[in-house]
Structures are given as C-alpha cells and as structure tokens.
Amino acid sequence: MTNRRGSQNIFRVGNLMLDRERREAYLGDELLSLTYQEFEVLSTLLTQQNIVISHTAICRAIWGRAGQQEIKRLGVVISNLRRKLGTLSPYTIETVRSRGYGIVLGESSLMSSSDPIGVHDWHSHRYAHDWMERQDDDARVYLRHITHLLPFDPDDAIRVLDIGAGYGALTRHILDAFPHSTVVVHDYSEPMLREARMYLSGASDAVTFVRGDLMEGDWKKDITGEFDAVVSTIAIHNVRHHDRIRSVYQDVFGMVAKGGCFFNTDYVHSAGERVKQARDHQLLMEHRYHLRQATGVWHPLADVATKVGTVGTPPPPKGEREPASLQDHLGWMTEAGFDHVECFWHDGRRALMGAFRD
C-alpha cells in the first residue's frame, strides 16, 4: 500500500485507508474490491467522519438527485459496504433511521475497564471535559517544547503519531508548526476522542483517529506504517506498571522510521533520596532568592520553609503507583533500540525525554 503523506486525496479511519486519486481502498493491507457507487459513497462518508450525513445529501453527491429510487439504491450500497468492511475497526457505518448514515467511532471490546487502579474515569464524558478544563499554562509550555524539538523543516510533510493524545492539544501545536504534516491521534478514551474531533475539526484532512488500550499488547493493531515522529504527553504513565511502559517503548521503536524520533513528557520520580533532597533544597533557595528581591533581606532557610510550606515533590495521590525514574525511562528507550536518548526538560515531577533513530 502506497502512503503519500500529506495528500489531500487520502482519508483514514482506524484500519481503513481510501485514496480518491487512485480510487483504491485498503482495509489493513487488503485491497478492497468496490464498485463505482460503493467507492463514491464510502468516500462521501469519510469526508465527514463521525457525522451523520442525510440520505438526500449522499444521493445528490453521488447521483445528482435524491428521489425514492436513489434512496433505495443507497440502502443497497450501504448494505454491501457493511459486508465488505466487516473487519473495520474501531469505526462502523452507523444508520440513524429517517436521517442518514455516518462513519462513526464504535465501541471496542478492549474498552471494558477504566484506569487499571481506578484513579481516572476516562469513559466518563464529564470527567474527560473536567480534565481538559484543569490543564494549566505549564502544559502549554511543554507542548510547545516538544513541537519545537521535532528535527524537521516546517515545510516538511512529516507523519506523526500522538499517543494518548487526549483532546488533541499537542496535535494542534504540531499542525500549526508543520502545516503539511499528518497526525494519527491515538487515545484510550472514547470521550476524549470525541473532544479531539471537535477541537481538530478544522484539520480533518490531516488527522486520523485511532482508539487503543496501552494496557493491551495489541494497542497498535489499527495503526499502520512508520512515523517520522512519535509523541506523547502525560499519558503513558497511566498504564501504571513499569514492565508495561517498557513494552510500549519497544513498540514505539518499531514504529519510528530511520532518522525519526520519539518525544515523551511524563511523570517521573527522583532516583534516590539524595537527588530528591537536592531538588527540594533548590526550590527553597529559589524562594529565598525571590524573597530577597522583594524585601531586600536574606532570610534563613528555616524561615523560608515556614513561609512557603512544603515545596518538595508531592507524593503520588492515594492509590497511585510510584512513577518510574527518569533513569528508568531513558534506560528503557535505549534498551528498545534508540541510538540517542536525552532529557530536555525536568522540573522534579515531570520530564521531557527524547529518543532518536539513526
């Protein structure tokens, strides 16, 4: 299957790819045998993913009119498409009686559980929306950091995978900085993917949405091809288990093209008590410095600690597993096969890590 990145004639949903210029459609690696009418109907549905299109609108787009004969013919075409797209995942052709049809995100049998230790309820639309509202300015800073670290010219037609993309904030930054890029938006949460569709609605030609559970070994089964860059922000730690994170890194290495890169911002913990003490001391010294700037007086550290309270790295919330250390993450990336790994930013609680293939 040829993948011409950046082409406005290529549409993807899950494991389905349709090339309007070549008039070809692939389900996974299998070339579909479609009639002219089947191809045109499928193409029409793919231009407006997750939206129900009226019978009359589809008929007029295909046959130029929308009488009873055309609407009946459309029903036959949809029935044939459903049969030929029997293994389409995780999308489906949905019928809304008396209204029309749409390619929409379906439910996945892999999505029966929430966060493995019950900290987040990613299947709740209200929870997903509230989580979005809580994102702070710090998050926007490291989203920009990742985008500017991507080692490509802004005019390059790069292909990017955003793992655990949430509502698509990082994807939006990448599309703005690299206007010819295409991004596969991956997430575990169906409510988050719906939010991402709305947030990225103006870039539908450049974005594909894929649902997958990082807790499962086949989380990437609907993601095809290699990527110039794989990115992730505050997501992979949600699998909790260190062995699972290590395995995800191994999967990622196999998806990064030669010359490509992987950037991940995630929670980390200090490797050892001495390192933690040093970071806590640094924070106190920073507060002492700012007090000196404001008052003209150097305060004893004990007084500074009393004024600002606990300034060290907070412990994980109740029920959380201790995050892996920065050294663990960099070691797992090296073990996966990356040629160069580095920490580009670290605030004691979160780190922006990068890995590169020669």
Image: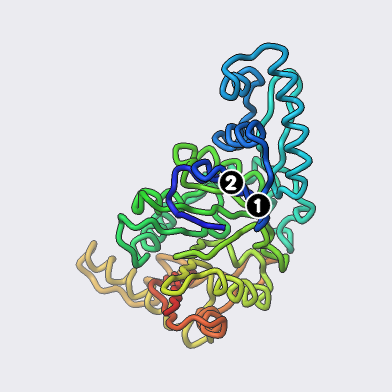
Residue at 63 percent across and 34 percent down: it is 36
Labels 1 and 2 touching (C-beta < 8 A): yes
Could you tell whether 319 is left or right of 83 in the image?
left
- Of label 1 and label 2, which has the lower sequence position? 2
Secondary structure under the numbered disc 1 in the rendered image: strand
At which x and y percent is residue 151? 34, 67
Query: Is any part of residue 28 visible from this angle?
Result: yes
Q: Amino acid at mark 2?
A: Glu
Query: Is any part of residue 310 visible from this angle?
Result: no
Could you tell whether 253 is left or right of 241 in the image?
left
Q: Which residue is mark 2?
A: 24
Secondary structure under the numbered disc 2 in the rendered image: strand
Q: Residues within 10 Å of mark 1 (few under 14, many from 20)?
A: few
Taking depth in this image into account, of 30 and 296 the one nearest to the observer is: 30
Quarter residue 42 falls in: top right
Taking depth in this image into account, of 39 and 230 the one nearest to the observer is: 39
Quarter residue 158 falls in: bottom left
Q: Amino acid at mark 1?
A: Leu
Taking depth in this image into account, of 239 and 118 the one nearest to the observer is: 239
At which x and y percent is residue 38? 67, 34
At which x and y percent is residue 169? 47, 50
At which x and y percent is residue 349? 49, 70
Q: Which residue is mark 1?
A: 31
